[in-house]
Image (tube, rainbow, N blue to C red):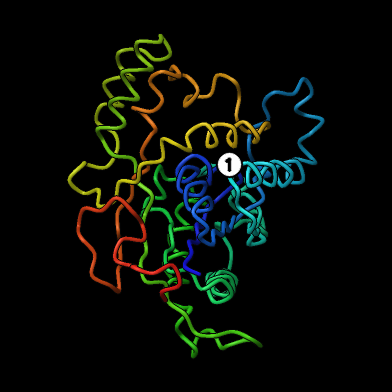
């Protein structure tokens, strides 16, 4: 069965940039796998009156939340890579001995290789080299994800374990926010009174230039599921979170498409495509 493996940094990240495609491809019967690099233990705590009392148990709470989000999206395969949230760049948490940011690179890659070989996805999704916005765990997802994409075929560096087969996905993508989409988003937030003119002007310049976007997937039919899954991340997502600031009647325009840059492809595929599986003609191709 053809499938997708999405590698993300923290619980909730899977919904923000790929919640639509996860729900879409799961509903189509494709195998969908989410691997989460960290436990999210350095995240904020919202929607509770006693956030400090919950801090020590935050990792367990976020594990419960991602399980609820996966159920909403219809994803039955979610795994943690086993690292601690590294916090924002420059935080003391960066140096925690179990932090993903300071993890042994080969060991971290080997852990992800195990999942790539186990599930044998045709498509992988990770982040761009900047991790989208410079978070250390997101940057590390790019590094480790790229290495595992290629390393799952490398028996010398990553010897086969019992039952494994060498594997390399056909296509690798970076999740990306197009500039035109950021501009729609910025306008909705400005008109709603959530940002000032200076922030609006900054947002109008943000995102990946549209000409560099290779893949635009229509996820509007799954947008409600995506937002419900986001709400399942209760500790992390407040009611006034930035994506919720867009009025419901404008959400499809702002978030009805999920967009990507195709980084590698082992098959012929058009530069512009509307499906991560474009060029893979059969559900069981590999």
The x, y position of residue 119, in whole percent, is 56, 71
Total numbered labels: 1
Residue occupying image coordinates x 59% and y 49%: 86
The x, y position of residue 203, in whole percent, is 31, 27
User: Label 1: how many residues lie within 10 Å, few (<14), some (14-19) or many (20+)?
Assistant: many
Question: What residue would you read off at disc 1?
Answer: 12
On the image, which quarter does residue 283 sit in? bottom left
Residue occupying image coordinates x 17% and y 45%: 211
The x, y position of residue 159, in whole percent, is 56, 88
The x, y position of residue 44, in whole percent, is 64, 32
Comparing 269 with 282, the one in front is 282
In the rendered image, which quarter contains the C terminus?
Answer: bottom left
Residue occupying image coordinates x 41% and y 18%: 249
Q: Is residue 172 above or below residue 9?
A: below
On the image, which quarter does residue 180 sit in? top left
Q: Is residue 196 above or below residue 276?
A: above
């Amino acid at each position: 069965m053809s499938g997708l493996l999405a590698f993300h940094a923290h619980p909730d990240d899977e919904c923000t940039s790929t919640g639509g495609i996860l729900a879409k491809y799961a509903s189509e019967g494709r195998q969908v796998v989410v691997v989460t690099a960290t436990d999210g233990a350095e995240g904020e705590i919202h929607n509770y009156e006693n956030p400090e009392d919950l801090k020590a148990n935050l990792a367990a709470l976020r594990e419960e939340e991602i399980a609820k989000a996966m159920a909403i999206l219809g994803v039955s395969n979610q795994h943690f890579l086993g690292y601690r949230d590294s916090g924002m760049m420059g935080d003391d948490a960066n140096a925690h001995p179990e932090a993903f940011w300071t993890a042994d690179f080969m060991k971290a890659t080997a852990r992800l290789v195990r999942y790539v070989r186990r599930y044998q996805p045709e498509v992988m999704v990770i982040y761009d080299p900047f991790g989208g916005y410079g978070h250390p765990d997101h940057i590390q997802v790019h590094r480790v994800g790229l290495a595992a994409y290629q390393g799952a075929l490398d028996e010398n560096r990553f010897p086969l374990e019992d039952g494994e087969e060498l594997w390399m996905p056909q296509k690798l993508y970076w999740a990306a926010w197009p500039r035109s989409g950021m501009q729609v988003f910025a306008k909705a937030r400005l008109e709603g009174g959530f940002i000032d003119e200076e922030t609006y002007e900054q947002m109008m310049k943000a995102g990946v230039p549209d000409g560099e976007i290779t893949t635009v997937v229509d996820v509007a039919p799954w947008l409600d599921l995506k937002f419900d899954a986001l709400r399942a991340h209760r500790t992390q997502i407040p009611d006034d979170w930035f994506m919720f600031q867009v009025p419901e009647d404008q959400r499809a325009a702002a978030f009805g498409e999920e967009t990507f840059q195709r980084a590698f492809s082992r098959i012929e595929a058009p530069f512009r495509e509307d499906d991560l599986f474009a060029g893979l003609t059969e559900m069981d191709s590999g």
